[in-house]
Amino acid sequence: MLLWFTEGPKPVIKERYSDHIVDSAINYLDIKNIERKYSPLKLMTDSGAYTATRKGISLDPYKILEIQEKLRSDIYVPLDYPFTAEMTISEIQDRWKKTIENTRLWVEALNRKKDVMPIVHALGQQNLYETVKILSNIAGNADYMGFGTIMFTKDDIKGYLGDRRLSISFINTLMEFIKVVKEEYGFKVHIAGFGSSPLTLYLAIYLGIDSVDSSGFRRRAAYGKILLPGKGERYVGRGDARFGITKLSSEDLQQIKECDCPICRTDPSLLWKSWRARAIHNEWVLKKTWLEGIRMARKDIEAYERYLDGIFEKSSLRYIWKYIKTNSRRIY
């Protein structure tokens, strides 16, 4: 499984020679001389469609494609049109058609010489199958298909414009997506936002997801939060956070003392002072989780299950893990 980290015009780390990076064309709309400020192993560039949808911004597909080319992308994500809960069925259908049209535009404009990753938006199970079939005909040479807004019920749409919010309904939709895209059509699957915490990374590895990305390592850092291995987030800010505040325990402080990330090895006090230091620490925790999870799962999946039993025992996501463990075998 690949893990992609978000960067942009003001990167956290410039030397990204061994990292898979995802960037958004929307970040460069107001920049005259477009160039990337980091050196990635591989770059995926999306349009910024979720940000545009949330802010009500209209994007020009040709401008988005131009920016992606100037950034010298390795994987191009076409401008897509996510759904929101406020939209009518007619609006959703119109956005679905525009996503299909743009996928065709990207494939034709790039002359099939570049890797295009179609994004799947669908309304209902039948439409999911229909959409994957259409996109496979348009972009049959693609390595990946991305999970967009896929609604089986009205509640499924909640949480799509941020990190993935886990629910039984979402997991059912995700497993169906993996089954169709990976098992029936042979594409790899990419789930945006599913690599933003150690716990979701563990689940992604278990589910057989091929690729995830994380912007949460930066966003949490900006809100004064750090990630801890095998746990969730902890707050080390200056008291101005308004939600999700879990302060450090004595056990957490010991973990920081034992942490081998570049920040904690040199000056762990920076975690309390610098958002950039927190971002570097958070990324390191996610990388460590990712590598250890893959190693354990490949070596012995049953031992990995037992490990996750312990990890999720005290987590609020315990019921999600139990559901996945009981029901996910059908997708393999």
Image: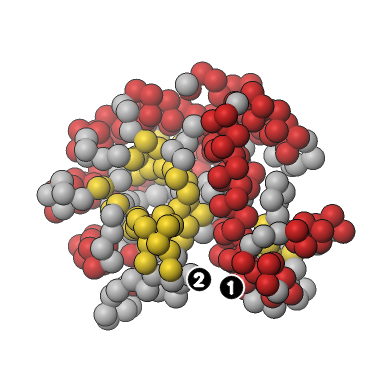
Q: Nearer the viewer, residue 171 or 289?
A: 289
Residue 284 or residue 218, whichever sits in front: 284
Does dot 2 land on a helix, a strand or a loop? loop
**Contact check, label 2 and label 1, Cβ < 8 Å:** yes
Q: Is residue 323 visible?
A: no
- Residue 161 is situated, as x and y percent measured from the top left of the image, at 50, 54
Q: Quadrant of residue 242?
A: bottom right
Q: Which mark is residue 136?
A: none
Residue 79's spot in the image, x, y percent?
Answer: 30, 55
Q: Which residue is mark 2?
A: 12
Q: Residue at x 33, y 40 (%)?
A: 144
Q: Is residue 184 visible?
A: yes
At 35% across and 47% down in the image, what residue appears? 91
Name which residue lies at 42% across and 25% down: 179
At x 74% / y 64%, what residue is drawn?
235
The colour scheme used here is secondary structure
> Can you give x and y, in whole percent of width and height, for residue 99 in the image?
28, 47
Give the image quarter of residue 273: bottom right
Q: CA distance from mark 2 to mark 1?
A: 6 Å
Q: Which residue is mark 1?
A: 276
Residue 83 vs residue 261, the one in the foreground:
261
The kind of residue on which mark 2 rests is Val
